[in-house]
Image (tube, rainbow, N blue to C red):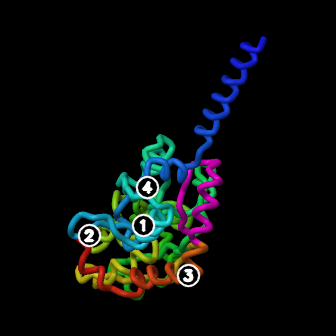
Amino acid sequence: MIKRYCSVLLVSVFLWAYAGLLSAGALDDAVRRGVLKVGTTPDYVPFEMLDKQGRIVGFEIDLLRAMSRALGVELELIAVPYTDLVSGLMARKFDLIGSGMTVTQERNLKLNFSDSFIVVGQTVLMHPRLAGIISSVEELDDASYRVVTTRGTTGEAAAKRFLGAAQLSTVTTPEDGVQQVVEGKADAFIHDAPYNLIAMSRPQNSALLSLEQPFTFEPLAFGLKKGDYDSLNWINHFLNQIAQDGSYDRLHDKWFRDTAWIAEIE
């Protein structure tokens, strides 16, 4: 009887420990291995992008580096196409998504999101032939206009929502979208305001026109697997801490007020 009791007890302890491992959060896993693995798509200026040395840099990347230091771990950035971020997280290829991802109701059905670390919106870049013709996004909602967006982004969703009558197409990267407008292959490009603002500052894009007022409200956040509330709690406290101690403002000014970094980007 005692032997049977001990066997049952050992099995119970094992199952309890195993269940604990299964329920461990992404940040717990990162601390155990000493590395925080983050999935990102480095083509979203100035949040994540490649510098001339091929390193991934940007505002969100600096936030992740600060997060890793606070955790006491190294940061490993895993570059994947934007459309592969959610599936990569589900396949445990990385611990969280840090890639300028907008919190949407559709995505929230698949992921849990941290508190937002910045709010952006969609804006429009246009070919100069539309000068004096188009003054609002609503005026682009016409079958005579060709509008391009980046595949899998909220820019694509916004175009489908607001510009259903226009000729809509998608490209793989925002650089491709801007280039199509520069070359006259498209009339307008829709993408997040920070990226479009910086794209306009580049000499090769200087002739483009801009509707600078965002026409959507889009909070960006870090994405984690559903149910990982311990990790969410830690990240939210981290974001609150850096907002209070001035770290966030310093990083924000570095990437959104200063322009020295532009010379280091490809």
Q: Amino acid at mark 3?
A: Asp
Indicate which disc, 3 or 1, sits on the residue closer to the N terminus.
1
Indicate which disc, 4 or 3, sits on the residue closer to the N terminus.
4
Does the segment drawn in magenta span residue 225? yes
Q: Do tag 2 and tag 1 residues touch (Cβ < 8 Å)? A: no
SS for callout 2: loop
Q: Quadrant of residue 129?
A: bottom left
Q: Residues within 10 Å of mark 1 (few under 14, many from 20)?
A: some
In the image, which disc is placed on residue 51?
Answer: 2
SS for callout 1: helix
Q: For mark 1, what is the residue?
A: 65
Q: Quadrant of residue 61?
A: bottom left
Mark 4 → mark 3, Cα distance in angstroms: 24 Å
What span is colored magenta in the figure?
A: 219-239
Between residue 192 and residue 75, name the one nearer to us.
75
Q: For mark 4, what is the residue?
A: 38
Residue 67 percent across, percent down from the top left: 48, 65
Q: Is residue 147 left or right of residue 19?
A: left
Residue at 48% x, 51% y is 30
Residue 149 percent across, percent down from the top left: 41, 64
Residue at 37% x, 77% y is 126
Q: Nearer the viewer, mark 2 or mark 1?
A: 1
Q: Nearer the viewer, mark 1 or mark 4?
A: 1
Mark 2 → mark 4, Cα distance in angstroms: 18 Å
Q: Amino acid at mark 4?
A: Val
